[in-house]
Structures are given as C-alpha cells and as structure tokens.
Image: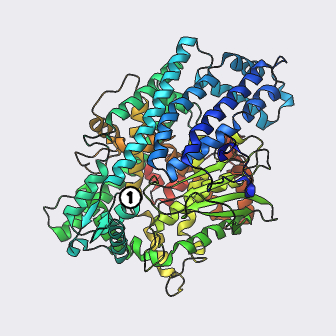
Amino acid sequence: MNTNPLLLPFNTPYGTFPFDKIRVEHIKPALLQAMDEEKAEIETICANTETPTFANTIVALEHSGHRLEVVTTYMYNMLSANTCDELDAVAEEMQPVLSQHHSDIVANTALYQRIAYVHDHADAEALNAEDKMLLDTTYRSFIRAGAHLCDEKKEKLREIRAELSKQTLAFSRHLLNETNAFLLHITDEADLAGLPELQRVQAQTKAGEMGKTGWVFTLHAPSFVPFMTYAEKRSLRHDLYMAYHTRCLHDNADNNESVVKSIVNLRREMARILGYDTYADYALERRMANNIARVYDLLNQLVEAYHQPALEEVEQVEAFARQSEGEDFQLEPWDFAYYANRLKKQRYDIDANMLRPYLPLNAVIDGVFGLATRLYGITFLPAPEVTVYHPDVKAYEVHDADGTFLAVLYTDFHPRAGKQGGAWMTNFREESDYTERPHVSLTMNFTPPTADSPALLTLQEVETFLHEFGHALHSIFAQTRYASLSGTNVYWDFVELPSQFMENYATERDFLRTFARHYQTGEVIPDTLIERVRQSRTFHAAWACMRQVSFGLIDMAYYTLATPFDADIRAFEREASEPARVMRAADEACMTVQFSHIMAGGYAAGYYSYKWAEVLDADAFSLFKERGIFDKATASRFRHTILEKGGTVPPMALFEAFRGRGPRIDALLERDGIDARTAGCH
C-alpha cells in the first residue's frame, strides 16, 4: 500500500494530483483503505467522552474522510473526462460500496446524537455566521439522510441509495456508449452540400482516424450541431437527428427506459421514507425556490411571457422554408435548425461560422482570462511543472492582483472517446481554511483543430467557455474556512448565477474587440459584424426559453409524482412539456432517456434553476450595464458579496447585498426582447 500514489503525500507543485503516477489499479485499494480511515475517524468522534461541542464534533466531522475525498474526486473526475473500460468496471464495482459506506455514516446513531446535541445546545454567541451555517447544514444533512429514523427505515434507505448509485452510473454509461456507437459515414461528396469547409475537413480527419475513406459525422456536439445547422440533404439530417434523439431507446444493453423508471421510483421512495410527499418536496427544501409552488410560478410566468412569441418564431421559420420548398412543405424537428439558420442569415446576414475565423481558441483563452484580469486584477501563468491527466490538458497558476497565489486551473477543451459530452467545471481540490487554495478544472467539447487551421469556435462555444469560467471564478475566489461551504457548494438554483452572469460578455463589443481577430489576417472583428451579432441576439430567444422550460416541466413532472411511475416514458414527457410545446416532436424521439442532468446529475427537481439563475444573472449584469461592463468597483462588489462567500450565507441575502434589493424579471425580458407590458410577469 505504501507504493500507491493515491495513499501517499502528493509531493507535487501546490499538492496537485500526480497524474503521471496514478493507474486504474490504484483506485480500488485506495478507496478501501480510505473508507477504513474515515470509519476510524468517525469512531474516534463518537468515542469522545467529553460533552459534544462544535469543535470536537462538527469541525471534527468536517475534517474527517479527507483521503476518501481525494480518491473519489480522482475517480469521478476521470470517469467524466478520461475514462476507459477498466475504470468503468472499478466504478461499477465500488459505487455500491461507497454508497453503503456513506449510508453507514449518516445512519450512525451515536454520531447523530452528538450532532443533535450540539445543534440544540451550542452557544450561538460563540459561533460566527460561517460556523452557524456549517452546524445547520451538518444537522440538516443528517436529518435529510434519515439519521433520526428507526433501524428498519435506515436499512431501507441504505438499500435505496446503493441501488440508486448503480442505476445513475448505468444511465451515464449507457448514454456514453450510445453516443460513441453511431457514425454517419458519407462517401459521396454531393451529400456534404451546405456544410462549411471546416466541418468537411473535420469529418474527413475523423474518417482518416478510423481508417475509413470519405467523411464521418458523430453524435458529439461539435459534429452533430453543425451538420443539423448546415447540411442541405434532408434525409441525412433526418438520419442524424433520429440517431441522436433515440439514443438509449434501442433494444440492447444500453436501453435506459427501465433505468429511468428505477431512478424516479427510488428517489420517490427515498423521499417518502424521509417524510416528504414527493422527491421535489425533499429536493426543494434546500433551494432558493424552497417549494414546488414557487418553481411552477416561475415556469408559468415564462410560459405566459414567451410561449406566443415562440410560436410566432416557429411559424416564421416554416413560412421561410415554404418559400423555397413549396406550400406543401411541413417543417419537421430535423429541419428547424437548418431553416432557422438560413432565416437568421437572411435577416441579419450572419451565421455561426461567420464568427469562427475571429475566434481561434488561443485568442479566446486570452480574451476570457484577460476579462478576469480587467475585472478583478487576477493573472494566469502557464504551469508546465504541474502534471496533467491527458496531453490535451493544460495547467495554469492563478494569482491575485497583489501576486498572492489563488488557485491551479486545468483546461481541457476537445472531445475524445473516453470523455463525456457537454461542458463542466469541477474541482480536484476545494478551498478551505482561507489558505488551502483550490484546484479547478474546466472541461469542454469544443470544435477541434484541423491539419489546416487552429480550433475555431462559434460564439455559442465562447459563451460556454465564459459560463464554465464563471463557475471556476466562484471556486478560485472562495474565501471560506470550511471546504463543504466553499466555492460552488451552494444551492443548485444559485450556483448558475456566477456562470450565466459571465455569458453576458459574449456579445459586448468592448469585450470582443480585446481578443477577436481573424486567425489568418489579424483583422480585428469588424464593428458591423458585432452589431449584427447584437441585433441577432434576441433571434429565437422565446423558442430557446420554451425549450428550457419544457425540460424544467419534464423534470418537475417526474419528481412531483406521489405514486410509483410505470407509464410510457415518451407519452409522459410529451404530456408534461405540452404547456411549453411550440412544434411537433418526432414520435420516436425521447428526451428523458438521455436527460443526464435530472437522472444521473444533480439537477433532479432542479432543472428550473437555469431559468431561475437567468433571472438573477440578467438582473445582476444590468448593474454593470448601468455603471460600465468593466467597472472595477462593481466587479469588486460582485467578488466580495457573491463569489467569495460560497455557501456561508443564504443566497438571497448574497444577491440582495450585491444588488441592493431582491431579484426582478424585468432585465431578462428586456435582454430577450420580450415586452414586459404584455408579459404579465412580476
């Protein structure tokens, strides 16, 4: 065991993971030893004969399990960013063991009694605000885990959590398998009509990597999205669309229908045992929204404001399509992106690929990092001495304006076979004790470079970068004593505020002109092009909103169920999303079996939080619009009132401290071009 790098001190720069030394075979023994260590630490807390206090119980528990946190952090981050069959197998084997271990801790009667004693008897005057938050969070986490229940119910919860862990892992594995399994192999160049040169080269490169001639398109976003947007051949758009939207529905080992039913019912049963009517009641207790009624109030407001404009947007696309295809043409889901893009180009003389030459990835990195420098004074220095988990990954040191070290930042930008789709920020180490600085990772799936050009991004990819970078800043700036309250460890419907806030800069002229230059000529992005981008920003804003709301409605429909779920999944999700529907869905398509956020991720009964946070971010950015988008005083206020505080203060109090009042929806409506006078929102 002494040779296992996961069990040895990390004698590395800033205590970063020694990725070059860790192998899959190290993970299981490290997990087993780390669990034993945490058990011993818990036993020591429980065996303490002194009266339970905040220090000898709550803080001691906070500091327990450190090694297990290290090992699980490595395993789960690698499962997302750099997995393989061997790692998948280890995770599948150890997931129920880890779940059982956690269940044993929260079901420990002696430990719970000590926590409850401190909660009931602590001297409030002796605790600061962060101490009180940790005490309350710890106590409530044990109550919500069932520590107060009888042994029979505790055992049932253990079984449910173990099975839930297995099912969520299976859901993710099935989705990755199905995404990787499909290839659209084109051998006739005529079938590429409409596709820009960049996508053709990338598809040809992919084919070459696979030992094939012609062009290969996949279900990964950098391949799928451009094909659906530009490919003229309707039958091929149909084929790719159906392949994407029927993932995990096929009659094979990766079908997720039974997995979904199991996940939904396990969560419902868990909530019922804990005394809640539904899983949503359980989940929302620890959210800004707080209850089901407030979530539906937001979703219904958005439907009222955006549904009719969204219907009109779809009708305009269909009318535009009929101009070229004939009056009998019926717009189908696989047509929408293609004709919407053509309409956008006609209306604004712009499409996504027009901006790519001005957005080479290296320049975008400089621009995003430079924005943080301009707002907050922080700087990013390459850290080649920090080892990384894949050659694609780069590491940086982040320093404050006075030179103080703030964080290590990893960046991982392009798709590969062992990497989940999408984009996310995660930590390899949380900030704690004000001086233990975080190790933060940004993981994307951006358009990769080709033999003839660097990675050229769309504006949407720039927005994604800014979004995840906002999460990173939330961790980088953290100034808390306790890791469990640090950085992004906040309510789910608040965590997206810092990230979505950053997206606002993507279409700001003064930001774009700091870095957006043509990768061949060096020409600064023209003001006329920026203006067309800004004018087009509200294009299909209502449609996009209804799409998000439909997902939120599906999520809430599953997790407000008070009885077991055994309905037809496709029929259920269509009925749930009907209030936000603006065009017919393909009969065979199904969102639920691919909906990782609410099935395998942390957004169960929480997908609404994207729109909730959008209200917050639009309102917050409106203050920057009033005072200047680079205003250092406003940025400093945002940093100190929101980004540094993590979960140490209730989120509504943080927002009010920054904005001077509670959030209002008006700024979001204005940004999206929706008339607040007719929207009926408040």
- Residue 328 vs residue 379: left or right? left
Q: Is residue 54 above or below residue 326?
A: above
Q: 588 or 68, which lies in front?
A: 68
Q: Is residue 140 above or below residue 577?
A: above
Q: Which amino acid does label 1 sit on?
A: His
Indicate the secondary structure of the residue bearing disc 1: loop
Residue 570, x across and y down, in percent: 28, 39
Residue 539, x across and y down, in percent: 40, 64
Name the residue furthest bottom: 521
Which residue is painted at 38% across and 39% down in the image?
A: 554
Q: 202 or 375, which lies in front?
A: 202
Q: Is residue 469 above or below residue 155?
A: below
Quarter of the image where one finds residue 544: bottom left
Q: What colour scheme governs how the chains and residues are painted in the rendered image of this protein?
A: rainbow
Quadrant that contains the N terminus: top right
Q: Can residue 604 be seen in this view?
A: no
Q: In this view, does 506 lie above or below 239?
A: below
Quarter of the image where one finds residue 166: top left
- Residue 243 vs residue 121: left or right? left
Residue 15, x across and y down, in percent: 73, 52
Which residue is painted at 51% across and 66% down in the image?
A: 462
Which residue is painted at 60% across and 55% down in the image?
A: 441
- Residue 394 vs residue 636: left or right? left
| Residue highlighted by disc 1 | 220
Residue 438, x across and y down, in percent: 70, 52
Q: Can residue 284 be seen in this view?
A: yes
Q: 257 or 306, which lies in front?
A: 257
Crowd tier of the residue under label 1, counting other residues whose Cα lies within 10 Å: few below 14, some 14–19, many 20 or above:
many
Name the residue furthest right: 126
